[in-house]
Image (cartoon, grey):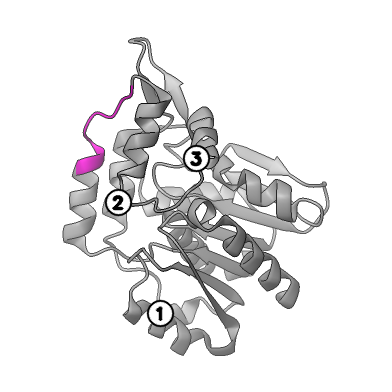
Amino acid sequence: MRLHEHVWGAEGAPEIICLHGVNAHGRRFRRLAEERLADRYRIRALDLRGHGRSSWEPPWTLEAHLDDLLETVTEPATWVGHSFGGRLTAEVLARRPELVERAVLLDPALWVPPEIAYTLAERQLRETSFATVDDAIRERLGSGDVVQAPRAFLEEEMHDHLVESPDGLLRYRYSREAVAAGYRELAKLPPPFEALRVPTLLVVPTHAKIVSAGELELCRAALGDLLTVAVVPGGHIVLWDAYEETATAVEAFLAATG
């Protein structure tokens, strides 16, 4: 299935493919694209299956997501993946390494222990709706994913991602079943780190525990000089909590490896 795209930058410029995490959408990358990258690159931020404006039909397996990506992206590019999008970037690199020139992994969820993955999946299947945008922002601030995101970032998120349902309540533009399936898929073992040998930027926030110390050491051992690590403040959604630090690290990495 070909995925819906949010596109910035000129046709013919070097391409950057951006992949969001579960329960998110491609426009999460808007600020990074418009403010930092679109004058030099063509940015294609995809809505994954079950999310945003792409089809919500199942299956929502890693294999299905990977097939969608390989149907949508057919030429070499730099890949930027946040959370689940980082795992998908690794999957593309393992299957079709010629498509990935460089990788930017923003607090990637490369693997989640099964007991945690299934707990998160069950939580996502519960009904989530909001009477107001303020209610949605309060819920997001209490989720633990966000530590210090500016309110303006969250207001933009709700504008892009919330949809009014026939009952008058606001709900996010994703399939809860697809999100739950995404968490369960993260319990599957990832590709070996040795398969990920391209110039890679790994962005790790100080207040999140997605990338374990063990995974970081495995990355260092497997990638050596190909790996750049940037530690930024805040929580899991680094493009909110540490936008300036993350954007600067991405720009510097692209300049150094271009």
Distance from the alpha carbon under mark 3 to that under mark 2 = 27 Å
Q: How many numbered markers are drawn?
A: 3
Q: Residue at x 47, y 65 (%)?
A: 233
Q: Identify the mark nearer the N-term, 3 or 2.
A: 3
Mark seen at residue 183: 2
Based on the picture, tell me whether residue 65 belongs to the magenta stretch: no
Q: Please, what secondary structure does the residue beneath circle 1 have? A: helix
Disc 2 crowd, CA 10 A, few/some/many (<14, 14-19, 20+): many
Query: Which residue carries the number 1 mark?
Result: 216
Distance from the alpha carbon under mark 1 to that under mark 3 = 31 Å
Tell me where residue 241 appears, x and y as whole percent.
48, 54
Tell me where residue 240 appears, x and y as whole percent.
51, 50
Q: Amino acid at mark 3?
A: Arg
As drawn, 107 above or below 231 = above
Mark seen at residue 9: none
Q: Main secondary structure of the magenta part?
A: loop
Tell me which segment is drawn in magenta: 123-130
Q: Determine if residue 53 is in view.
A: no
Query: Which residue carries the number 3 mark?
Result: 151
Q: Residue at x 29, y 36 (%)?
A: 177
- Tag in front: 1 or 2: 1
